[in-house]
Image (cartoon, helix red, strand yellow):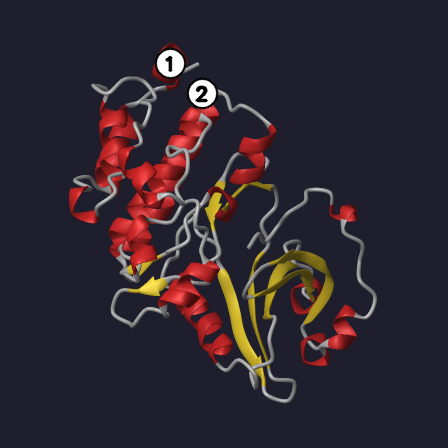
Amino acid sequence: MNIALHNDLSLTPVSRGVSTEYPFLQMRYALRNIAGVGGMGVVYRANDTLLSALGATDDIVAVKMCSSDLVDHPQAEQRLLMEYQNATRLKHPNIIAMRQFDVCRQQQKAFLVMEWLDGLSLEQLLYQQSLPADVALKLARQLVDAVSPCHSRGVVHADIKPANFQISPENHLTLFDFGISRWLYQPSMTFNDMIRACSCRYAAPELFNEQPPTISSDLFSVCCVLYRLFRGEHPFKDTTDEAAARNDEIAPIFGRRYPLDKILLQGLKWLPRERSTSLAALQQVLSQLSAADLSRYWF
């Protein structure tokens, strides 16, 4: 689910009565407009009135609220709490900052407060334009830097895709939406819940065989996103057809003998045991790659 969809917030008019619909939020947050809607909740653009009263300039926040009442869907509160807990384990400049989790028992609503992200999602950016070599390389490095601390702290994001990376006007990348993330030391959500919530286009194939998300499945998704970032297309013609994807000949970006291609192709192996690479290896190769190299072999 996108947290910030528009630079021009006038595209989404302020909804009258949003704040009064949830009076338990009025004491602190003034909800302005809906910024995004997903399978697990609704995200509002809001003002933190306490910060405003203190004269802070960064009083805009994102408030994510469960779309279902907790009475009918008691697991919704647990999911939102897990999102908060997993993301708060990861204090990193390329990972969204969490501010608050709370529950209103009277109205049976759970909500999550996060930093507001300006800009466009990577999905929107790739759809709108071809990126210059230096920008593509900068975003690729930040993308791997964002996922790496997740794994080192035992968190599997489980829904890595271009739509879950926000790009600021200054080309700063932020990973968000930990709604189906998993801490490796806790049980995962059920298979059906996972498939409904994640993006099938970038999900590792083992997730469709009722396997829990792992560091390896995240790596597969990272390689899919990087491939699209550099190549401009998805590595597989049709990821919904297992037989076709298994035998699909993935076109290299530069050439199969180049280090980046070798690592990406290893990370895109259909079977987890065959993915003989790591985020650390990706970081090393990307750090040694220059924009001039990209321009020479790719553009």
The disc labelled 1 sits on which kind of residue? Ala
The residue positioned 66% from the left and 54% from the top of the image is 57
User: At which x and y percent is residue 147?
Assistant: 35, 48
Left or right, 58 with respect to 199, comes to right
Residue 235 visible to an observer of this rendering? yes
**Is residue 142 in sight in this rendering?**
no
Which residue sits at x=29%, y=58%? 209
Which residue position is annotated with label 1?
292
Frontmost residue, 167 versus 233: 233
- Against 118, residue 288 (above or below) is above
Residue 239 lies, in percent from the top left, at 39, 42
Mark 1 surroundings within 10 Å by alpha-carbon count, few (fewer than 14), some (14 through 19), many (20 or more): few
Residue at 25% x, 29% y: name it. 285
Q: Is residue 153 left or right of residue 109?
A: left
* Residue 227 placement, left or right of 121: left
Q: Helix, strand, or loop for circle 2?
A: helix
Q: Are marks 2 and 1 in contact (CB under 8 Å)?
A: yes
Residue 29, quarter of picture: bottom right
- Sequence-wise, the earlier of marks 2 and 1 is 2
**Which residue of the protein is positioned furthest toward the top in this rendering?**
296
Question: Dot 2 corresponds to which residue?
Answer: 133
What residue is at 56 percent from the left and 81 percent from the top?
103
212 and 176: which is toward the camera: 212
Which corner quadrant holds the C terminus?
top left
Question: Residue 278: percent from the left, percent from the top?
Answer: 22, 42
Q: Is residue 197 left or right of residue 248?
A: right
Residue 150 in the image, given as x and y percentages of width and height: 32, 54
Which quadrant of the figure has residue 114?
Answer: bottom right
Q: In the image shown, does 210 or 43 lie closer to the viewer?
A: 210
